């Protein structure tokens, strides 16, 4: 057997975001958010995966979104690239999802909790060796948690996870091992198959069960992500000004992938931005739907 890597957006959505993957996603979320406790009875996957294929390659900002049986919303992102201002983007998506629950005129009592689960293929927090971390609002000195805790973030940093197959004990360890090592497996190990939903996820990830077109799409995404890794690595190695120029080109290509052709006068404005402004643009463009949004942002941030 050969298994695809769940790290690309195409594979991640196929494994966790399809209408047939509900039990897989419930087990995954119970393990990583609720420490293996069976807290989720049911969920609804928003905009479930379907077998569409890309005509243009671009970065993905949100992979899977689900509403749990208690009304909570979970936004799940698998992030391979350590792009500028990614830490701000996580908070932005969390806050935006929370505020967008209310329709005009509705009271705050209708707000439900939102959880951001982020899996990264790079190290985010140098302050700790723990690969699974959780963040909530709490008082700075006495450390008590803010009442009606509605916003929380859970991070899984794959490079920090070093347990071998024989060392896996908890459901969270087994799911994280799946995320990191699936393409290196040659069969479904007994240790992982103890959790039926992981066995199901590996069955979905089995290349033998995928069409040639699916595999071509996956290969296209993997090549694209490797190229982007190289661009980002080079930008950081070149120094501040050189890095600014590379970042400018990187942001411009992302904008073109998202919005289509960019007018030359707007490109000239982008070329004048500082590195800090480019980082801000990298966060803000997640919400752009047209070149008008880009023009308005440039006007307000010159």
Image (cartoon, helix red, strand yellow):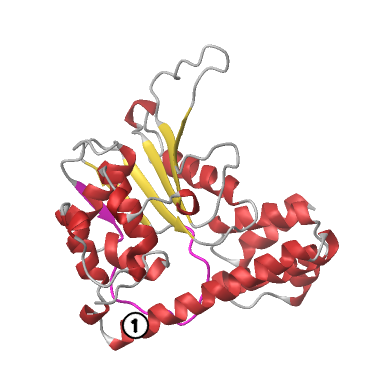
- The rendered magenta stretch, by its main secondary structure, is classed as loop
Badge 1 crowding class, 10 Å Cα cut-off, few under 14, some 14 to 19, many 20 or more, is some
Residue 53, percent from left and from top? 37, 80
Residue 132, percent from left and from top? 42, 41
The foreground one among 169 and 302 is: 169
Name the residue carrying label 1. Answer: 215
Residue at the image position 43 percent from the left and 54 percent from the top? 77
The foreground one among 261 and 217 is: 217
Residue 274, percent from left and from top? 81, 56
Query: Where 84 falls versus 116 (above or below)?
Result: below
Is residue 275 visible in the rendered image? The answer is: yes
Considering every residue shown, the one lying at the far front of the view is: 166
Residue 84, percent from left and from top? 65, 55
Name the image quarter holding residue 234: bottom right
* For residue 85, side relative to residue 211 (left or right): right
Helix, strand or loop for disc 1: helix
In which quadrant will I find the N terminus?
A: bottom left
Name the image quarter holding residue 71: top left
The foreground one among 110 and 117 is: 117
Query: Where 257 falls versus 74 (above or below)?
Result: below
Considering every residue shown, the one lying at the far top of the view is: 142
Residue 7 belongs to the span the image colors magenta: no
Residue at the image position 45 percent from the left and 19 percent from the top? 146
* For residue 241, side relative to residue 103 (left or right): right
Is residue 251 visible in the rendered image? The answer is: no
Magenta stretch in the rendered image: 43-61
* For residue 109, side relative to residue 200 (left or right): right
């Amino acid at each position: 057997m050969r298994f695809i890597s769940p790290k690309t957006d195409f594979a991640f959505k196929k494994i966790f975001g399809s209408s047939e993957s509900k039990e897989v996603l419930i087990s995954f979320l119970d393990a990583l958010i609720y420490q293996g406790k069976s807290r989720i009875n049911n969920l609804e996957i928003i905009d479930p995966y379907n077998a569409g294929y890309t005509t243009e390659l671009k970065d993905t900002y949100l992979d899977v979104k689900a509403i749990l049986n208690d009304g909570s919303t979970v936004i799940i992102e698998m992030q391979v690239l350590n792009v500028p201002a990614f830490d701000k983007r996580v908070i932005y998506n969390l806050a935006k999802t929370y505020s967008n629950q209310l329709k005009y005129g509705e009271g705050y009592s209708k707000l439900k909790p939102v959880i951001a689960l982020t899996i990264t293929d790079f190290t985010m927090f140098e302050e700790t060796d723990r690969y699974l971390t959780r963040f909530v609002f709490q008082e700075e000195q006495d450390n008590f948690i803010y009442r009606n805790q509605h916003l929380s973030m859970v991070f899984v940093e794959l490079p920090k996870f070093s347990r071998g197959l024989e060392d896996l004990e908890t459901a969270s360890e087994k799911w994280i091992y799946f995320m990191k090592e699936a393409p290196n497996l040659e069969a479904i190990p007994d240790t992982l198959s103890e959790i039926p939903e992981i066995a199901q996820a590996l069955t979905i990830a089995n290349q033998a069960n995928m069409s040639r077109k699916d595999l071509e799409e996956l290969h296209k995404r993997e090549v694209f992500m490797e190229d982007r890794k190289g661009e980002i690595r080079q930008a950081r190695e070149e120094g501040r000004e050189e890095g600014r120029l590379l970042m400018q080109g990187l942001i411009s290509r992302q904008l073109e992938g998202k919005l289509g052709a960019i007018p030359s006068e707007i490109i000239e404005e982008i070329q004048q931005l500082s590195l800090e402004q480019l980082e801000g643009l990298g966060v803000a463009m997640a919400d752009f739907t047209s070149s008008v949004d880009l023009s308005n942002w440039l006007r307000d941030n010159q």
